[in-house]
Image: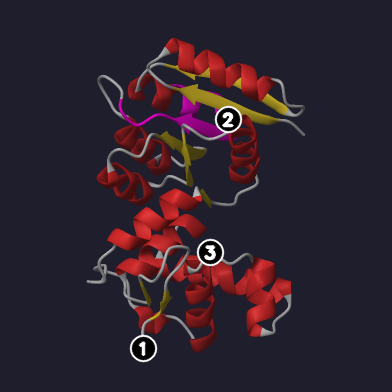
Amino acid sequence: MSVSVLLVDDQRLVRTGFRVILEMEDGIVVVGEAADGTQAVEMALRLRPDVVLMDVEMPGMDGLEATRRIAAGGGPSVLILTTFDRDDYLFAALRAGASGFLLKNGTPEDLTEAVRVIAAGEALLAPAVTRRVISTFTTGGTPGIRLDQLTPREHEVLVQLAGGATNAEIAAALRLGETTVKTHVSRVLMKIGARDRTQAVVLAYELGVVVPGPPGGGHPRA
C-alpha cells in the first residue's frame, strides 16, 4: 500500500527537490503541493494524504497555524521540516499537533524513512532536535492534566516514553509483553491528552515526570 504525501513549502525548488527524492522510493506518492498554510489546510483536508510535509516559515498563514488547523480538523499527520533556527517554533508546533520533526540538512534516506514512520502512526524527532527540546523544557506543569490519573505502571511507561524507548525496549525494561506495553501506551496517551508519542515526550517534561539530563535523554524526577 502506497504512502501519500502533501508537500508544503513556499519555495518551488525545495518542493521539487522533495518530490524527486520521495517519488524515487517505491510506495511513496506525492499527491499535491502547497505554497502556504492556507493552501496546506485546504488541500490536507480535501486530499487526505497520509503525511503532510510542512515548512514553518511561509508568507500568510505559517506552518504552525496550518498544523494546528489540520490537527483540529482531524486531518493527516504532520511532519515538520525545519532548519531549527527558532526553538519556540518547535514547541508551538508540538503543541499544535505535529507528529514529528526533521532537519532540512538531513539525508534523503532520513526524509523517506521519516515519512514512512509518520505514515505508520508513529512519532519522530530528529536526535539533535530531541536534545535541544529537552534541554530547554521547564517543569512547571501543564494545567488540566492530572498525573494521579495514571496507574504506577502507566507512570513507569510514561518515563520510558520520555526517554525515547520503543515498545520493545519498554517491554524489556519493565519485563512486560509487547502487547501489554501497547495497551499501556494507548492508555497513557489518552489520559494525558497526547495525540502521539512525540506529544507524550513534551508533556512528560512539562509535567515534571522526568527532568533534563545529559544529551540523549532525561531521568525520572526523584
> Disc 3 marks which amino acid?
Gly
218 in the magenta segment = no
Splitting the image into 4 quarters, where does residue 144 fall? bottom left
Q: How far is mark 3 from mark 2, CA to CA?
A: 27 Å
Of the numbered discs in the image, which one, if any, rests on residue 222? 1
For mark 1, does the 10 Å Cα neighbourhood hold few (<14), some (14 to 19), or many (20 or more) residues? few
Q: Is residue 196 visible?
A: no
Magenta stretch in the rendered image: 43-57
Helix, strand or loop at label 2? It is loop
Helix, strand or loop at label 1? It is loop
Q: Earlier in the sequence, mark 3 or mark 2?
A: 2
Residue ID for mark 3:
164
Q: Is residue 2 visible?
A: yes
From the viewer's perspective, is residue 18 above or below residue 120? above
Splitting the image into 4 quarters, where does residue 21 fall? top right
> Disc 2 marks which amino acid?
Pro
> Disc 1 marks which amino acid?
Ala
Q: Earlier in the sequence, mark 1 or mark 3?
A: 3
The C terminus sits in image quarter: bottom left
Q: Are marks 3 and 2 in contact (CB under 8 Å)?
A: no
Q: How far is mark 1 from mark 3, CA to CA?
A: 19 Å
Q: Which mark is nearer the camera, 1 or 2?
A: 1
Q: Residue at x 50, y 23 (%)?
A: 7
Residue ID for mark 2:
49
